[in-house]
Image: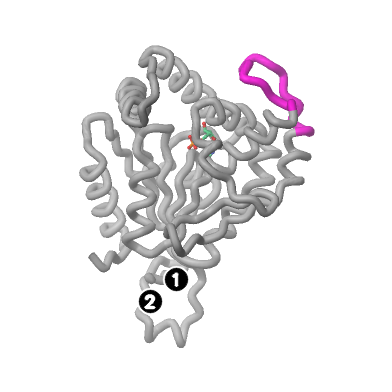
Amino acid sequence: MTVSTADNTPLSSDDTSQVKPLRYPVICIDGPSGAGKGTVTWRLAQALDYQLLDSGALYRIVGLKAFEAGLITADTNQTIDETAVLALTQSLEIAFVPNNKSGRVDILVNGEAVGEQVRNETVGGYASQIAVFPTVRQALLKLQQDMATRSGLVADGRDMGTVVFPDADVKVYLTASAEARAERRVTQLLNAGQTADFEAILTTIKARDERDENRTTAPSKPAEDALLLDSSTLDANTVYEQVKKHCQDQGICFNS
Ligand code: DC
């Protein structure tokens, strides 16, 4: 694992006995849903043996719990009680636990592993609704920042490079047209044996982008020092290679 000093000078393993490492490297991959962040984040974490932070999962968990508690509905025009969502967020015990079997990080909520039930578009919509609240974002901040105190980290989200890890070693903003992202989602659903309506998916994607990019607190946007990458016409491998090259240019060492 590479350890960097605050001025970003990589330390060799010999040096670490003399100089206390101040922090671990952090790579931020921000951008909208469906741009391919998840795949790049996963591959980088595997290649570098870093931990992975799926910050969207946090907002999805709170969104789902808020729905189950009757605090939100699918109606995006409703008025939501921010204080109640904050109280709910604070009542949740959320932990990231490395799973040595799968090589992934399990998310436990009140001791129970959160499965695939947070991964659908409906829960993504709930997440986007509660993600506008500054107090809820603040309540989730430390949990995310703590992830970088244990090892190198690859963080996937909307505000990783702008708010959560402003001093990150590498920042990438990965985007793609709404049409390309809707097309990918359709293919994913069809491959999973489900039905898919392109127009309906496109409308949902655009509505979520609009909310995530235009909220007042921590909107989804590239950090000033982020590499902008449009994956609309690129395959996943090309995206990964371009991001990897950028990481190397910023001083991150890959073994392979
Ligand atoms: O990345 P995702 O689709 O799992 O994220 C779900 C929603 O959570 C997204 O629409 C907005 C919110 N989110 C956020 O506001 N900030 C993050 N860092 C990650 C996700």
| Other-residue count near label 2 (Cα within 10 Å), few / some / many at <14 / 14–19 / ≥20 | some
For residue 181, what is the image quadrant?
top left
What residue is pinned by disc 2? 11
Residue 177: tell me if it is visible. Answer: no
The relative height of residue 85 versus residue 74 in the rendered view (above or below) is below
- Report the amino acid beneath label 1: Thr
Q: Is residue 237 left or right of residue 130?
A: left
Q: Give the mark, 1 or 2, whose residue is nearer the N terminus.
A: 1
Q: Where does residue 17 sit, x and y in percent of width and height?
A: 45, 87
| In the image, residue 205 above or below residue 152 | above
Identified at 40% across, 57% down, the residue is 169
Q: Position of residue 129 (x, y in %)?
A: 61, 27
Element carrying mark 1: loop
Question: Which quadrant does the C terminus fall into?
Answer: bottom left
Q: Is residue 181 magenta?
A: no
> Front-most of 144 and 17?
144
Q: Which dot marks residue 5?
A: 1
Q: Is mark 2 within 8 Å of ligand 1?
A: no
Q: Secondary structure at mark 2?
A: strand
Q: Is mark 1 within 8 Å of ligand 1?
A: no
Q: Which stretch did the figure color magenta?
A: 70-84
In the drawing, does residue 139 fall left or right of residue 27?
Answer: right
Figure coloring: one colour
- Is residue 53 toward the left or the right of residue 181 in the image? right
The crowd level at tag 1 (other Cα within 10 Å; few <14, some 14-19, many 20+) is some
Q: Quadrant of the N terminus?
A: bottom left
Q: Which of the pair 203/31 is nearer the observer?
A: 203
Whole-angstrom CA distance, mark 1 to mark 2, is: 7 Å
* x 72%, y 24%: residue: 80
